[in-house]
Image (spheres, coloured by chain):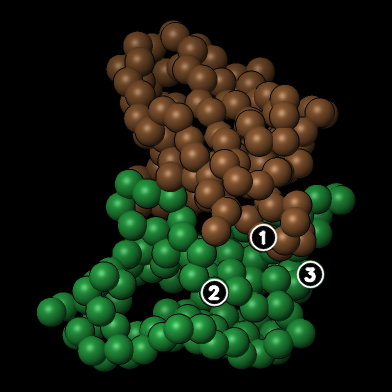
Chain colours: A brown, B green
Amino acid sequence: GAVVSQHPSWVICKSGTSVKIECRSLDFQATTMFWYRQFPKQSLMLMATSNEGSKATYEQGVEKDKFLINHASLTLSTLTVTSAHPEDSSFYICSARDLGQGYNEQFFGPGTRLTVL
Amino acid sequence: GESVGLHLPTLSVQEGDNSIINCAYSNSASDYFIWYKQESGKGPQFIIDIRSNMDKRQGQRVTVLLNKTVKHLSLQIAATQPGDSAVYFCAENYLDTGRRALTFGSGTRLQVQP
């Protein structure tokens, strides 16, 4: 089956630093990847849609200058949390759509736990 | 905007019993629905999906029912096992401004008592 990986699986950083999270589709190509954020005991909230070769589409209320998304290839999207603060601490999850399986197929990564001190 | 709603909670069942998890959605434009299972500290895992032109779909030990009239979705798990303990989310998929967006419900925690 389609596999999506994320790196790192967890990260702890100091307030004010930037953190980059990678999302890779391992055995399929994905023109579209999605980034979600999940706070404890809450549901997944879509942050942005990452499109290969073009600018990401951000959801309302998500600061594009704070959450930088780059989708440089069909298998890699990165999310950079710039000038991280404690309130950015969360579980970040990406998903990727498999080109070969039609528009409905979306596979999720294992998530990245970000803790900002 | 509209969202999938799911009233809370925790569902506790005995091992071997059947489980039913419910979900209400509000976006009438949604045409595809998915159930995900999420274990602690992990990403969502696909369980089963259903398109809006269907009202029932069965998988291995799981069945999804869709009632478009009342905008209701349910997940039935037969012979629930301890390994089924997790948080379950329903999600709806619809075409929005040219892209396929996925909206998650609030989730239900399933606890299976041995």
Picture disc at residue B29: 3
Tell me which chain the residue with mark 3 is part of.
B
Q: Position of residue A68 (x, y in %)?
A: 64, 21
**Up-down: is A96 above or below B7?**
above
Locate residue A84, reporting x and y percent: 46, 17
- Outermost residue, right direction? B98
Which quadrant would the N terminus of chain B be assigned to in this image? Answer: bottom right
Q: Which marked residue is nearer to the observer: mark 3 or mark 2? A: 2
Q: CA distance from mark 1 to mark 3?
A: 18 Å
Residue furthest to the front: A27
Residue lying at 53% horizontally and 28% vertically, measured from the top left: A22
* Residue A12: mark in rendering: none
Real-space Cα separation, disc 3 to disc 2, in angstroms: 20 Å
Q: Is residue A48 above or below residue B16?
A: above
Residue A93 can be seen, yes or no: no
Check contact, mark 3 vs mark 2: CB within 8 A.
no
Q: Quadrant for residue A53, please give it.
A: top right
The amino acid type of the residue labelled 2 equals Ile
Q: Residue at x 36, y 63 (%)?
A: B87
Residue B26 sits in quarter = bottom right
Callout 3 amino acid: Ala
Residue that label 2 marks:
B48
On screen, residue A96 versus residue B62, left or right, reads right
- Parent chain of label 1: A
Q: Position of residue A117 (x, y in %)?
A: 30, 17
Q: CA distance from mark 1 to mark 2?
A: 11 Å
Report which residue position mark 1 lands on.
Answer: A105
Residue at left 60%, top 46%? A27
Label 2 crowd bin: few (<14), some (14–19), many (20+), radius 10 Å: some
Q: Which one is earlier in the sequence, the residue at label 3 or at label 2?
A: 3
Q: Secondary structure at mark 3?
A: loop
